[in-house]
Image (spheres, grey):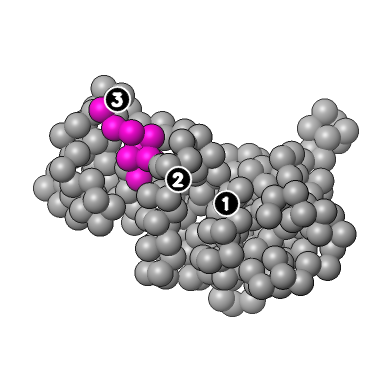
Amino acid sequence: MNDKALIAVNNVKKYYLGGEVKALDGVNLEINKGEVVVIIGPSGSGKSTMLRSLNLLEVPTDGHIVFDGEDLTNPKLNINKHRQKMGMVFQHFNLFPNMTILRNLTIAPMKLLKKSQADAEAKALELLDAVGLRDRADAYPSQLSGGQKQRVAIVRALCMEPEVMLFDEPTSALDPEMVGEVLQVMKELANKGMTMVIVTHEMGFAKEVATRVIFMDEGKILEQGTPDDIFNHPKDQRLVEFLSKVL
């Protein structure tokens, strides 16, 4: 493992049905600080399982995941403490419907980071401002569009001041015209140097923003490289076939 690696995935396997289904089949991966790693591949290739393993939402059958020098697969480790350093954004926004946007954003920093209400609200409003939603602070989730909810979900993760952001197909549940506004927020994060791991079907976004693209199929990483390597000079035959269908 190199010294710069923020996350190191060592021979991680995730098997179901007693090993009949190999969702992850010996994955090795290092993610360095400031990298934007985009994971692509067909449905059922293990992309989301891989991403969710990084903060142990999926517990590997075998192998190790080292984050910030700590082995997350060590059962003695307080995993919740480490999850606080990893922001996670899902397909569905998981906002509390009975709370205002501001309350949705401040509840975890106050509870888990022990921030005062004033500090938590100031940070939340600053981040809402950055994504163009400051005027929606007192609204409820039901009053927002899908794209707005997903931008709020990103802000909620950022309110915890994470070291890395994990995105699991953040635009796949959105209407097409709302996809751009969410990707724009992610681009701005990338430009600020946030370490990001993103599972997405948005190939244009991957080309533009990724520092490295990883192609997965059948639970394995079959090829990885710069966007130029992957999209313009693919080597693996499965990758060539995949790109012929999605580009």
Residue beneath disc 3: 142
Mark 3 is on which residue type?
Ser
Q: Which residue is mark 1?
A: 202
Image coordinates for residue 136, horizontal then vertical, percent: 19, 39
Q: Which residue is mark 2?
A: 179
Identify which residue, 237 or 86, lies in the foreground: 237
Q: Is residue 131 magenta?
A: no
Asked if the residues shown at circle 2 and circle 1 are in contact, with their CB atoms under 8 angstroms apart, the answer is yes
User: Which quarter of the picture shows residue 179?
Assistant: top left
Most common SS among magenta residues: helix
The residue located at (42%, 42%) in the rendering is 177
The segment highlighted magenta reads: 143-151
Which residue is drawn at the image coordinates 15% and 43% (left, top)? 135
- Nearer to us in this view, 148 or 18: 148
Chain-order first, disc 3 or disc 1:
3
Residue occupying the far left of the picture:
118
Image coords of residue 85 (percent x, y): 43, 54
Q: Amino acid at mark 1?
A: Glu
> Where does the image place residue 132, in percent across and percent down from the top left?
24, 51
Residue 53: which numbered mark, if any?
Answer: none
Could you tell me if residue 184 is visible in this image?
yes
Q: Are marks 2 and 3 in contact (CB under 8 Å)?
A: no
Q: Nearer the viewer, mark 2 or mark 3?
A: 2
Label 2 vs label 3: CA separation?
19 Å
At numbered mark 2, what does the secondary structure look like: helix, strand or loop? helix
